[in-house]
Amino acid sequence: MIDEILSVVEKHEKWRGKQCLNLIPSENVMSPAVRRIISSDFGHRYTARDRFYMGTRFTDEIEQYGEKLAREVFRADTADLRPLSGHIADMIFLATYAKPNDTIMCISPYVGGYPGMWNPGLARLLQLKAAPFPFSKHDMNMKVEEAKKAIEQIKPKIVIFGASYITFPYPVKELAQTAHENGAIVGYDGSHVLGLIAGEQFQDPLREGACALFGSTHKSFFGPQGGMILADKEHGETMKEAIFPTFVDNAHWNRIAALTLTLAEARKFGKAYAKQVAINSRTLAEALFDYGFPVVCRHLGFTQSHQVILEYGDYSMGRAFAEKLQEVNIIVDCGVRIGTCEVTRRGMKEGEMLKIAELIKRTAVDGENSEKIRKDVAKLCSEFHKLKYCFAE
Ligand SMILES: Cc1ncc(COP(=O)(O)O)c(C=O)c1O
């Protein structure tokens, strides 16, 4: 039995870790040092806010260290690393600031918003009404004047920026002002773009009017899977009080220790990484467009994030495309979103983006022999197995 279990893990490691070109924008890879911390003794331990457990000397120290680094990297008054995922971080924010029957305004999942925020998701769980931002799919962004009017009319309790399909910064500054004038609290779900925000590449929600920035730590941010909340003093302290014991009892301390080291990596290497992610996305988008793929937002330069979006109009076509790519070990989702965060972390640059576009075209347009493309994919991956933007071991 042990052998069987270990063998599945090994097979996965070999396939997804070595042979696949991973282009899922929700995923990334941790540095070897961060991965090691995940299996440290911290993974066995408990702490509680009421100091019920003894033996927490170093757990407390790592938490303080991590929060300090997070405050520095995101220039936030407060940081909390306890949320177990981006979804839980979203829930903490919503549940702290809205009560049943309140309305939240966010991007509808029908145009790329996060379905977990909507119905059936947190909105249903917390009995909130979800109102969609007036949104242009053509521009992948809010329609500013219409959104201002909608905020004035609907008067949502909370306005949340951020989405699962995200290519451009949002007009946070313009809309936050209207939201504040109408009594709303403004938050930014940065699950997808946290690594770009850390690298000062995308936008700076906490300076643009959001009181809190929260989300996943493992998408464009290259940490362990989990969540994080950065906020101004007032809102951050309120959420800190609310977290235990409602949303997190024991936090996962191995993850938090690993996240602490990731934050140190982000502080030192985050700008160079985020810049390269954006360059890579744009290069890949242009090359795919030139091959005839339906890349969105050509009129805006395609993308400024870690995502390149292909619009097939029909989910089954997106799935067929993603399945075809999976046959040659190129991994994307059925959206179709193509992410450059992991390949950038592996050290790939513009030249490799052109190679990736060509591999995709050979697979999906030319219908070339899969075995041959799989070999070329494996060769490309083998040249980039050592991670960049992290401390030398
Ligand atoms: C915008 C957004 N917010 C939150 C989440 C949830 O993140 P997690 O998977 O860390 O719970 C996702 C997941 O993809 C997302 O796209």
Image (cartoon, grey):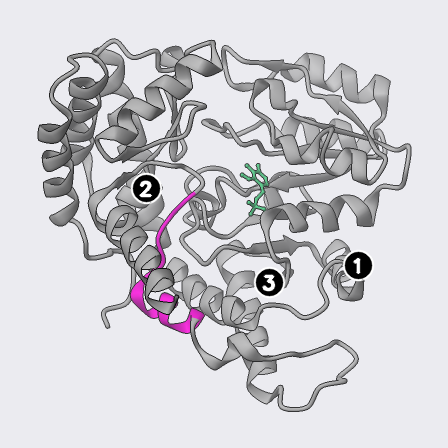
Which quadrant holds the N terminus? Answer: bottom left
Identify the secondary structure beneath mark 1: helix
Which quadrant holds the C terminus? Answer: bottom left
- In screen coordinates, is 187 left or right of 354? right
**Which badge, 2 or 1, comes first in the chain's sequence?**
1
Look at the image and give the residue range highlighted in magenta: 27-38
Q: Residue at x 63, y 68 (%)?
A: 251
Asked if the residue under mark 2 is in contact with the one under mark 3, i.e. CB atoms within 8 Å, the reply is: no
Can you see residue 94? Answer: yes
Which image quarter: residue 128?
Answer: top right
Q: Residue at x 58, y 74 (%)?
A: 63
* Residue 152 drawn above or below residue 281: above
The dot on residue 81 is 3
Ligand 1 shows up in the quarter that is top right
Q: Measuring from the top left, give residue 360's x and y in whole percent.
A: 22, 23
**Which badge, 3 or 1, comes first in the chain's sequence?**
3
12 or 68: nearer the eye?
Answer: 12
- In screen coordinates, is 368 left or right of 54? left
3 or 2: mark nearer the eye = 3
**Residue at mark 2 to residue at mark 1: CA–CA distance:** 34 Å
Q: Which residue is mark 2?
A: 275
110 or 75: nearer the eye?
Answer: 110
